[in-house]
Every structure is written in structure tokens, then in C-alpha cells.
Amino acid sequence: KKCPGRVHVEKGEVTKESKREHNHRPDRSKIEAKQAIENMKKIAKETELSSQVVLRYVERVIKYKNILIIITKSVASKLPGISSMKKTIQRIHQKEIMAPANPRTLDELVIPTEYKTTIDGKPFLLYDSNDEKSGKPRISIYSTEENLNLMTNCNNWYADGTFSSAPSIFYQLYTIHGIQYSNVLPFLFALLPNETEETYVRLFEKILNLKLELKPKTFMLDFELSAINAIKKVFPNTSLHGCFFHYSQALWKHIQDSGLAIKYREESNFALHIKKLNALSFVPPHLVINAYEAVLETEFYIENETLLSDFLDYFESTWIGKLCRNKKRRNPKFLIELWNCYNLVKYDIPKTNNSVEGWHNSFNSTLNALHHSIWRFIEALKKEEKLNRLKMHQFLAGTEPRQKLKKYKDTASRIKANCNDFENRNIHNFLKGIAQNLS
């Protein structure tokens, strides 16, 4: 017999209930299934996650914002079919992004007003070089007045580019981050047409024009010469630092290229002596060459001179400088001050760009597609901007920033103790002490 009982629900809340009695027992699993569908719709509406990713919560426990969903077998039996739920999610995504046709070239790109503002309606597209009709390759800069103000108070900037999340009509997404409440957060997003020095100069000059008070003390990036040279031109008083992780990666690549990888992996003593070259980053910059030459005079490097010749030739030309006939060294490809970490460690400034790369990886996974439409990309940026504002409000209210894992904190503490005690240590013991803390 059909149940005469009725209840009206709006956005999960009971708004009206009939006086007629229900003629059946309550079906808790059916109620939970409906709640699961509502939560699924909420996640689909507020994120860029694909239908497949959204549906994963059907199989296990998931916590999204303040939503904790537990799907039991009885609840799963009351859910619609997977294909039906996928279509529901896709319809929500389409409704959320009723976008214009995706342009095939930058010349076709005309940005509507709704893609120039934040979710809260504040200016977000702060610069589009197309407005100047200069004929130069197009650059777009997304940020907010609030973020630019925060950047003026950030002494240390961190920058990195990514290609996988950039819309197909642009070459790369380049972001600048700063530290707020002990967290590295993105403040500015730039879409660039290439990675030439000229383009980077245009980018940094325009950023400076947007806020003349911008004067970072340090700027960390990877070892990209075009960006390094551009920053030197636009911010001549800023101290540049390459990411220590990228420095270590570069050395590891050439260890492999020089045929030393197996020996490095299998012989711990061999690896420890090679790591002393990584450890040179933590020697005061004016003493690095002396320290390097002291390393070359050790028994290990003398005995393995032939084996290490290719690797040391690369190391000198790239990081130290080749020795001339007059016993002076030429400038290396990357100046010692660029890859040196001594002062960063002394003053508790991060020595890597890992948090920035982590942000890029997270943003790439959020978009969940290579070279998606420009409109989906901008919508994702707008959501990211709002999320960052929420984080800053939470930190301001006293929410504890995410802490480093204990093993990383302990390693950083030991390295700093070594650096603080540099003047009291023999250079060989110092380099060995640092090398033992490097992975």
C-alpha cells in the first residue's frame, strides 16, 4: 500500500512535514543514500574533480571540507548506477561552466568580464598585454590588490613554472609565492607564451608597475637562466637563490650520465664522498672554492681521479668555474652565490622550492586534464584564490599551519647546528657532517 506520509526537504533541511502517519518502518540506508548523492553534487559543484574521482567516495570513507561520508553495503544498494551518477556529475560541471567556445589561438582569445574577476567580484585579471596592442606575445597576470599588498610585506619570494596545467594556447603557468603565517602561499599567477628572457623581463616589469613598493630581499627559483637574468635586470637589489633540491637533482643526473650511479647506490662510502660536493652549498660562499680544492686533495678524490674526471669536469664548468693557466677560475654557468644555502640556513629561510612544486602538483591534479580549456583553467584559478583567502583567515584566527614531518625537522636542525658551528670545525669534518644528513 502506498505510504500517505509526506515530508518536504530543502538543501538537506526538513521544511514541512504532513500530519499523516507513515505506514512503514524507516529505511535508514535510503536516507543515507540520498545524503550521499547530495554530498556528491556538492563536491562536483565546488571542485574541478572528474566524475571518476568524485565517485571514489562511494567505495570508502572520505572527508571533504566538513563532509564525512561513510558508504555501507546497504547504502550502496540504494544508490543509482555508476553511469547515472557520472552523468549527474557531468551535468553539474556543465552547468557550472557555461563557457564560451574555447579559442584555438591567442588572437582569438577575448576574455568576458566574468572571467576577469574573483568569485567575490573583485578585479582578478590585473594585466592583459593584448590591451596594449603592442604586437608582442601575449601575457596575462592574475592576482588581487590584497595579494599585491601581501607581497610588499614578503621579504622572500618563490617562483616556479609548469607546462602541464597551462591552457593549450599558452606555453606555461608561472606563479609567485610568499610566506604568510609560516606557510608558502601563491599570490600571483601568470600565463606566458614562452620562457625567453624578454618575456620574463616583461612579466617582472609589469608586476613592478602594478605595485611599485614590491622589493623582495630574496627570490628563489629553479636554475633557469632566462628567468634569473630577467630578475637581475628588474630587481637588481634582490638576492637570487636556486633551489637546493634542483641543485641536488642536477648533480644526480650527471652522476648517472657519468656512469657512476651503480657504484653510488651500492657503496655507501663512495656516495658519502660524492655528497661532499652537495654539501659545498652549506659552506660560506666566499670559502666554497677553498673547500672544493681541499676536497680534491683528499685520498678518495686522488685515487678516483680518472673515474670521476667527467663528473668533476661538469661540476667545475657548471658550479665552481674551470681553472685557468693563471690559477684563477672562470665564472661558472651558475655563480656560487646562486646555489649557496649558508645564509638561508642561518636565517631560517627555506632552501628549496618544494612547497611551490607541491602547489603546482596539487593544482594540476585538480584540473585533472592536460591542456584543458582556458575557461576551465580560469575558473580553477578563481577557486584557488578563494581557497587561499580562506586559509589566510584561518591562520589569522589561530589555525596551526601544517607542520613538517619530524624526520625533516630533525635533519634541518642538524644541518643548521653544523652551519652555526662552521668556524669551529675542520672543513673535512664539516662537509662530512653535512653529507651524512643529505639523502
Image (cartoon, rainbow, N blue to C red):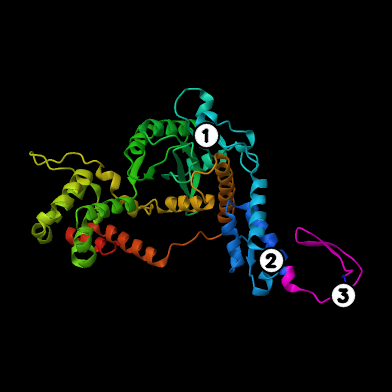
Q: Nearer the viewer, residue 183 or 124?
A: 124
Q: Is residue 398 in view?
A: no
Could you tell which of marks 1 and 2 lies nearer the N-terminus?
2
Categorize mark 3 by other alpha carbons within 10 Å: few (<14), some (14-19), many (20+): few
Q: Quadrant of the C terminus?
A: bottom left
User: Secondary structure under badge 3?
Assistant: loop
**Image quadrant in which the N terminus is located:** bottom right
Is 165 on the left or on the right of 252, as rendered?
A: right
Sequence-wise first label, 3 or 1? 3
Write the residue at 18% across / 51% down.
Answer: 311
Q: The residue under label 1 is which amino acid type? A: Arg
Q: Amino acid at mark 3?
A: Asn
- For the residue labelled by badge 2, is the local secondary structure a helix, a strand or a loop? loop
Magenta highlight on residue 92: no
Identify residue for label 2.
Answer: 79
Residues at circles 3 and 2 in contact by the CB criterion of under 8 Å? no
Q: Residue at x 52, y 39 (%)?
A: 148
* Residue at the image position 38 percent from the left and 43 percent from the top: 219
Residue denoted by label 1: 104
Please tell me which of labels 3 and 2 falls first in the chain: 3
- CA–CA distance in space, label 1 to label 2: 40 Å
Residue identifier under label 3:
23
